[in-house]
Amino acid sequence: MIKSGFISIIGRPNVGKSTFLNQIIAAKIAIVTNKPQTTRNQIKGIYNDDRGQMIFIDTPGIHKEHHELGNRLNNIAWSSLKNSDQILWFIPANEIIGLYENKIKDYFHKEHANLLKKLIVIITKSDTLTKDALVKKEEEIKEFVQHNNVTTISALTNFNLETLKSQLFDNLPEAPLYYPIDEITDVNNKFITQEIIRETIIEKTREEIPYSIAVIIEKFDNKDNYLFIEAKIIVDKDSQKGILIGKGGKAIKDIGIDARKKITDFFEKKVTLKLLVKVIKNWRNDKSKLNQLGY
Ligand SMILES: Nc1nc2c(ncn2[C@@H]2O[C@H](COP(=O)(O)OP(=O)(O)OP(=O)(O)O)[C@@H](O)[C@H]2O)c(=O)[nH]1
Ligand SMILES: [Mg+2]
């Protein structure tokens, strides 16, 4: 009796959705940073064992949108819920319950009560609190969510991940496998490369820049023992181009060194990486540019 199904992961930004996805499938397919609004797409991570198959769907963090991009990211997150068998709503143990927890709560309780039966509230980052503080936080979150299916985890220490997997399998329908068992994700190598470059820039820049960039892979020449990549970094202001390139090209060189190392580790082959920076003014509000960038 094989079970299989789709499990969406939602929550506000920075709560550990992508970290959890990577941990479950034991590979880094989704980028992770300590800044909010890192993920911009639905990313599937496929977990298999002898009980069956679980397809986890990582989504962008739900946030207040200031641009058409933000609007699209929120839609990507909400739309993942439609065809899911189960839904994981992530709430971090180490932060106060905020505006976006209230929005998500209203979404389920007021607008989509039909989804409540699929919902598991996940308290994340349990490792950040002492045992006593965690018990208090769990009580607070349970009271807030008004839902009796609540589980605490840490993706960092693996706390409760096995229990959660069992719980998910218990509730999944009997169904044939949706993906071949050797596939761990639906994203391709070009996408992963683009995301590694974006992750590096987010890590290495500040203020508006992490949110203002997009990466396009212009060339991806994947040979047996080497990989040649040419990527364009899009920014939305001239001033950002200057900052990203840096004095005498130092900033972009640093980004290139780190990104190349990560790409080399990921693909386990020699990598040549060429980076170009291009300004597309206000691209985050430009519908055709957003389409072109895959958002
Ligand atoms: N201490 C601790 N930190 C965690 C845990 N899970 C994730 N983090 C950290 O939290 C930060 C955000 O993690 P992400 O996985 O990028 O969060 P996200 O929810 O995918 O964020 P968005 O893509 O912006 O929506 C990173 O610095 C992670 O290292 C955890 O279980 N414990
Ligand atoms: Mg993420």
Image: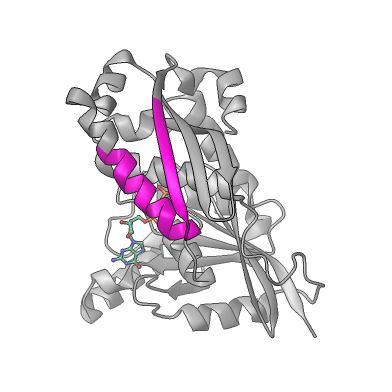
Q: Is residue 32 magenta?
A: no
Judged left or right of residue 171, residue 264 is: left
Residue 12 is situated, as x and y percent measured from the top left of the image, at 42, 49
Q: Tell me which residue sits at (64%, 55%) in the image.
A: 113
Q: From the viewer's perspective, is 273 left or right of 108? A: left
| Rendered location of residue 176, percent (x, y) | 82, 72
Q: Measuring 37% from the left and 72% from the top, which residue is drawn there?
A: 154
> Which quadrant of the structure image shows residue 257?
top left
* Residue 256 magenta-highlighted: yes
Place residue 94 in its image quadrant. bottom left
Q: How many marks?
A: 0
Q: Nearer the viewer, residue 34 or 64?
A: 34
Q: Label the magenta part by its dominant secondary structure.
A: helix
Where is residue 70 shown, x and y percent of the image?
Answer: 48, 32
Q: Which residues are magenta?
A: 254-276
**Outermost residue, front side:** 225
Of 225 and 106, nearer the camera is: 225
Residue found 28% across the figure and 28% down from its top:
244
Question: Would residue 146 be visible to someone looking at this image?
Answer: no
Of residues 218 and 124, the one nearer the viewer is 218
With 170 as the anchor, is 121 left or right in this view?
left
Residue 258: give x, y in percent of width and height.
Answer: 31, 47
Q: Nearer the viewer, residue 270 or 257?
A: 270
